[in-house]
């Protein structure tokens, strides 16, 4: 089996970057894999402390030697995550035909590359399949070893050139199609999460998410995304260190302690998995609203009454 190239996007988190590289190198396939590390550059008038972290991150990348081949791309100035991902994935898909994608806060299990490469090979000529995902949510319920969903994930994923060529960079085109075709509720997982609003915010430059555009591109092209029943990656960025991640542990998972067997399965969305994911997001929404209420309560209601209310 020919192993797909891996691209890792890093910026200013040296400890996260080192941890991700250490875990990735524990995959037996790492020694036969090409690794490309995209190091984003500093913003204009960057603070000295941040510049030190950027340089420290680059120093870690330069010393990496546990893969078949390591290529470092150091940007002279800041491109931002969205532009970096789009550029890197495009370049590698054009050159190699497929790519496995990680960011500096996505920690892979020792079985991540085996799952990714096996699935990339198995479904490379199956046009209905648009991507392979390594993350699965902390849901409760029985699901198959692998399954398909219509929605994508951006935490440890892979794709082929044939699918990435369908990526629409202009969010306004995607938003207009979803709204005009009355697909918002389905795209938003029965209204459990506001993906359409996220896409609208990207159009209005309130966020710069490449991931929502990738999700919408695959959704409109009617492509499926493969998922494992147990997560092969976890996000370690919810510690306040990231630009977009903030502080939260709602998505915390335990990494799979065993390989995930990838075999051919029916090319259809798993209704069980979709239902469980909808329940997860609805539970998340209730939790968020309850926390918002508590914050307001502590601000405006006398403390002696709070125990009765919350």
Image (spheres, rainbow, N blue to C red):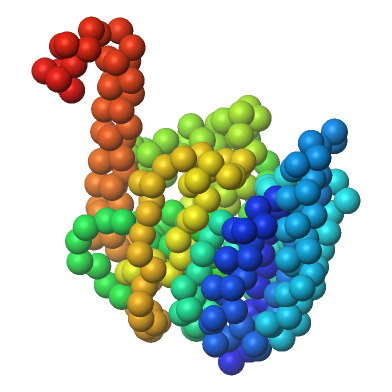
Q: Is residue 253 visible?
A: yes
Query: Which of the pair 89/252 is nearer the observer?
Result: 252
Q: Quadrant of the C terminus?
A: top left
Q: Which residue is drawn at 58% across and 66% down?
A: 20
List the single residue furthest toward the left.
308
Residue 171 image point, x, y percent: 62, 39
Side (left or right) of 175 relative to 14: left
Query: Which of the pair 49/108 is nearer the observer?
Result: 49
List the single residue furthest toward the right.
76
List the single residue furthest toward the bottom.
1
Q: Can residue 116 be seen in this view?
A: no
Q: Quadrant of the N terminus?
A: bottom right
- In the image, residue 52 sits, relative to residue 179, either above or below, namely below
The quadrant in which residue 187 appears is: top left
Query: Which of the pair 88/166 is nearer the observer?
Result: 88
Query: Which of the pair 123/227 is nearer the observer?
Result: 227
Label total for image: 0
Side (left or right) of 30 relative to 39: left
Residue 22 image point, x, y percent: 59, 73
Q: Which residue is drawn at 26% across and 27% down?
A: 290
Q: Residue at x 36, y 73 (%)?
A: 256
Side (left or right) of 276 relative to 216: left
Q: Residue at x 59, y 79 (%)?
A: 25
- In the image, residue 194 sits, relative to residue 216, either above or below, namely above
Residue 231 image point, x, y percent: 39, 66
Residue 161 image point, x, y percent: 66, 69
- In the image, residue 118 sits, relative to residue 1, either above or below, namely above
């Amino acid at each position: 089996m020919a192993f797909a190239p891996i691209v890792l996007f890093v910026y200013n988190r040296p400890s996260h970057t080192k941890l991700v590289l250490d875990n990735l190198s524990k995959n037996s396939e790492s020694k036969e894999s090409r690794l490309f590390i995209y190091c984003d550059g500093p913003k204009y008038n960057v603070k000295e402390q941040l510049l030190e972290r950027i340089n420290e991150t680059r120093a870690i990348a330069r010393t990496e030697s546990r893969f078949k081949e390591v290529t470092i791309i150091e940007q002279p100035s800041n491109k931002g995550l969205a532009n970096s991902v789009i550029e890197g994935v495009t370049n590698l898909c054009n050159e190699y035909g497929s790519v496995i994608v990680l960011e500096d806060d996505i920690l892979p299990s020792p079985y991540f590359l085996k799952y990714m490469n096996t699935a990339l090979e198995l479904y490379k000529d199956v046009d209905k399949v648009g991507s392979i995902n390594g993350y699965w949510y902390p849901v409760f319920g029985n699901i198959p070893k692998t399954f398909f969903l219509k929605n994508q994930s951006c935490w440890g994923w892979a794709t082929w050139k044939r699918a990435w060529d369908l990526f629409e960079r202009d969010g306004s085109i995607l938003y207009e199609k979803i709204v005009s075709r009355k697909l918002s509720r389905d795209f938003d997982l029965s209204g459990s999460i506001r993906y359409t609003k996220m896409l609208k915010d990207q159009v209005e430059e309130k966020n710069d998410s490449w991931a929502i555009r990738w999700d919408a591109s695959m959704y409109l092209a009617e492509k499926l995304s493969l998922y494992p029943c147990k997560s092969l990656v976890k996000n370690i960025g919810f510690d306040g260190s990231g630009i977009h991640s903030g502080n939260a542990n709602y998505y915390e998972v335990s990494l799979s302690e065993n390989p995930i067997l990838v075999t051919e399965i029916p090319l259809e969305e798993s209704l069980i998995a979709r239902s469980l994911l909808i329940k997860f997001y609805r539970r998340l929404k209730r939790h968020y609203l309850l926390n918002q209420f508590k914050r307001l309560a502590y601000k405006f209601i006398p403390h002696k009454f709070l125990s009765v209310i919350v």
